[in-house]
Image (cartoon, rainbow, N blue to C red):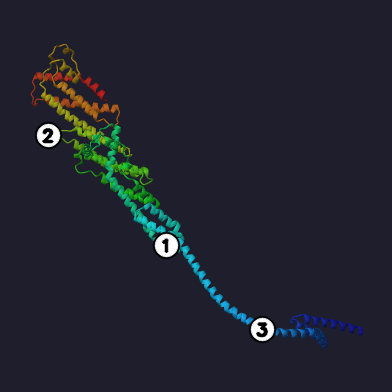
Amino acid sequence: MMNGEHNDGQVSDTYLDNIIKQLEISDGSQATSCVRSVFVRNDAGTFLRKLDERIKYYDNEIEKLCNFQYQSFVKSFHELLQVRKDTTSMKNELVKNNQMMQEAGQSLAKKTEGLIKEYHRQSNIQQTIDALSQAFPVFETYRKLQECMEEKKLYPALKLLEQLETKHLVLVKEHRWSELIQHNIAKFRNQIRNESHNELKNFLENVATHADKIGKSAFAQAAARLDIDRRYYMLEEDRRKDQQQQADGSTDLTLINMNITEIIDFSPIYKSLHINLFLNCKEEFSKHYQREKQKQAPVIMDVPPKMHESFDAFKKYLQRVTGFFIVEDHVMNTTEGLIDQRFYYELSERATQQLLAVLRRAVDFCLQPISTGGSTSYNPDLMLDMKIVVVLFCAAIKESGFPVTPLLDVLMELRESYQQLLLTQWGQKFKEILRKDNYTQMVIEDETQYQLLLRQFPLRIEATEKLPFPRSLPYSESVPKIFLEIKDFAAVCAKFAKGLNVSKTEIDDMIRKPSNLLLTKTLKSSLVDLTAAESELQLNFSQLVQICINTIHLENSMPYLEDYIVALV
């Protein structure tokens, strides 16, 4: 029993020692649980005893430690008292130094504040300099732009506009004044576009002024190619100037060698096109140009009053039309997309209709009889001259791509009118020859007279070749005269073919058809009128027989006329 109780006491002491150790090392959070376990085990008395013993143990340890350190403590205390005096002195020094530092700090703070303000000022100045360095090119470019606009230097102004928009204004867009400049740029663009339209207007006025001179140069060049006389393109005023200046033909060479760019300055139209291309308004400008040309074309094509009564006015009109279309062709070939073939074709198509009407009125005027001394006559030479001018016109304007086929068709109409006019004129000549003939055999006095006759009428009659002079021929005086007039008629018909660029077959046809009509209708009609009962001559039987003989010999001379026509072709 004693051993059991002894063992239980050892266990309890060990447990309580552990509890006390836990209390020593814990932060107090376990105190409640430790005390509860002691009371649960009914070891409160033992615990208090052991706790008291542990306190006494620590008191002894503290006392030992204090006794051991006492001398050092006393020494340290004395040293601390000594330091107290030094500390007071140091405190005074620190207060003094602190006051000095406060005063110095206030001065430094003021200087620092001033330095900060100066830094901000310098920063603002630098920002201002940077802003001005960005703004200066804008203002300088804007100034140059205003100068260019005042001096109407449109293309340099466009370059400056581009620099402002793409290079300078993007750097200063945060400034409000840049909005004002941007607004003015739009105004400048409109002003430049309007100026380009004014340039176009001046160009069109220049074209209207010099179109006839351009056309005259084209006529001169066509005349040189076709070997046509200068009088068909020169005007009366030109001839007077040549006489006054005693010209030696240099005027013709000048016209022939003249280039269109020497007469018309095309730079305004090129400049205007380039400007609108730069402004991305090319299509709008092209439409504007075409509208203006459509307005100008009727003015150019307008027929002057009584033009058909003046050959010079007729030539000048055709030269003006030629010059107008040569300019358009040049513009079409030297600009990209300003006008195209479709627009040129429409313009020329409308002009063709006007020209056809003009030419037909001119033909009608040429067909009008001329009254002189109570008699009427016709002037086929005027129609022939008109034909040559029309040929020149077609040759000149064809170089610009103008469709001339309908105009050449009018020439065919003119040819028929010309031939009809010739038939009428030669009918009058035949009647006059027949009226003056005495219808007796022709008497040749000598060989000289006979050779002269053969040159006019090459028909030889064997029965009379061996007769002595004076020699009587079987036909009367009207036969060689009529034969000569027939030859002249064929020659005049052949003149119409000159410059038409037709084949020999067509030329032959242009001579033979009217010549056949001359013989079968015109001459026949004259003979019928001569032998009619109501004829004023009242021919006797012998004269009628002579007319029959004349007809036979005239018919026998037709092979010689055939040879002459072949030679003409």
Q: Residue at x 57, y 77 (%)?
A: 104
In which quadrant of the rendered view does residue 220 lie?
A: top left
Circle 1/circle 2 CB separation < 8 Å: no
Q: Which residue is mark 1?
A: 178
Q: Classify 169 as above or below 334.
A: below
SS class of the residue under badge 3? helix
How far is mark 1 from mark 2, CA to CA? 84 Å
Looking at the image, which is closer to me, 486 or 179? 179
Q: Classify mark 3: residues with Cα within 10 Å, few (<14), some (14-19) or many (20+).
A: few
Q: Classify 498 as above or below 7.
A: above
Q: Classify 32 as above or below 471.
A: below
The tag earlier along the polypeptide, 3 or 2, is: 3
How far from the left and from the top, in percent, is residue 44?
81, 87
Could you tell me the amino acid type at mark 3? Ser
Q: Classify mark 1: residues with Cα within 10 Å, few (<14), some (14-19) or many (20+).
A: some
Q: Which residue is mark 3?
A: 89
Could you tell me the amino acid type at mark 2? Thr
Residue 353 appears in the figure: no
* Number of marks drawn: 3
Task: Please identify the quadrant where the N terminus is shown.
Answer: bottom right
Q: Classify 440 as above or below 429.
A: above
Q: Which residue is mark 2?
A: 372
Q: Closer to the camera: disc 3 or disc 2?
A: 3
Could you tell me the amino acid type at mark 1? Ser
Q: Is residue 181 left or right of residue 386?
A: right
Looking at the image, which is closer to me, 540 or 60? 60
